[in-house]
Image (cartoon, grey):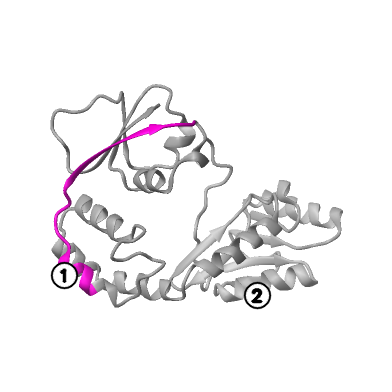
Amino acid sequence: MTLHSLPLFVRLAGRPVILLGEGDAADAKRRLLERAGAVIGDEGADAALAIVAISDERTAAEAVARLKARGVLVNAVDRPDWCDFTLPAIIDRDPVLIAIGTGGASAGLAAALRQRLETLLPHSLGGLATALDQARAAIRARLPAVDDRRRALGAALAPGGALDPIRAGADAVPAWLAGVGEAASTVVTIRLRSADPDDLTLREARLLGLADRIHVGANVPAAILDRARADAVRIPGASASAEPEPGLTLYMEMA
């Protein structure tokens, strides 16, 4: 499955961004840029990014063409086909940022999803992230190997884990770190009942997100494998290996 866009978080504090246009749409983009600390300039500014919020079609098209000719990446408000980048709906749990985009297909859908997720994600999420950042050196000392750290954090942050983001706050980090140890070797077999990723159980989806390696049987669809970690090793064939390897190994096949 091909990504229509690659999501990126860009630090704009103190950096110039061109904003063209007037009215409610331009004002909304101005507030967002100011919140990110950008230096807002006109078309003559030496900037890498520009937002064009001009209502007149011809005037907007001419501005977009001039900016793109300079190599500036452009967002054209309400004109997704002209956009080099789009601005997502944002959930802010500083320092956690969650961005929801539809590639310009429907800003209303992105906003509705943001509102739904706002009710699910606690305000303590930011504190948990800050505590994990402050404990980075201690976590490295306790778990020197990168894979061990990733497995331990993955298990702790999973639903029901010691650092479950929906339930845990900053105060949960020291207790988890005091008790964390080496990850065991775990092998799980998943027999898929359907080629539709929406038919995965919550447990299966969680295992895909945590797996270190996946032995892939015949006819397992790419849409299912897309739910796994990007750096999980994919191994053709679902036959069991002689020796269990560290971390979580999945054997996945169609039922």
Residue located beneath label 1 in the image = 178
- The picture places residue 47, in percent across and down from the top left corner, at 60, 62
Q: In this view, does 113 lie above or below 104?
A: below
Q: Which amino acid does label 2 sit on?
A: Arg
Is residue 186 one of those drawn in magenta?
Answer: yes
Front position in the image: 151 or 75: 151
Residue at 38%, 21% (x, y): give it.
Answer: 218
Residue range (magenta):
174-194
Q: In this view, does 207 lie above or below 72?
A: above
Residue at 38%, 49% (x, y): give it.
Answer: 206
- The picture places residue 123, in percent across and down from the top left corner, at 46, 76
Q: In which quarter of the image is residue 149?
A: bottom left
Is residue 151 one of those drawn in magenta?
Answer: no
- The picture places residue 75, in percent across and down from the top left corner, at 67, 56
Residue located beneath label 2 in the image = 31
Whether residue 37 sits left or right of residue 132 in the image: it is: right
Whether residue 251 sits left or right of residue 90 in the image: it is: left
Q: Is residue 217 visible?
A: yes
Front position in the image: 191 or 24: 191
Q: In which quarter of the image is residue 131?
A: bottom left
User: On residue 224, which mark appears?
Assistant: none
Front position in the image: 22 or 62: 22
Residue at 22%, 50% (x, y): give it.
Answer: 147
Q: Is residue 149 above or below residue 170?
A: above
Whether residue 50 sits left or right of residue 36 in the image: it is: right
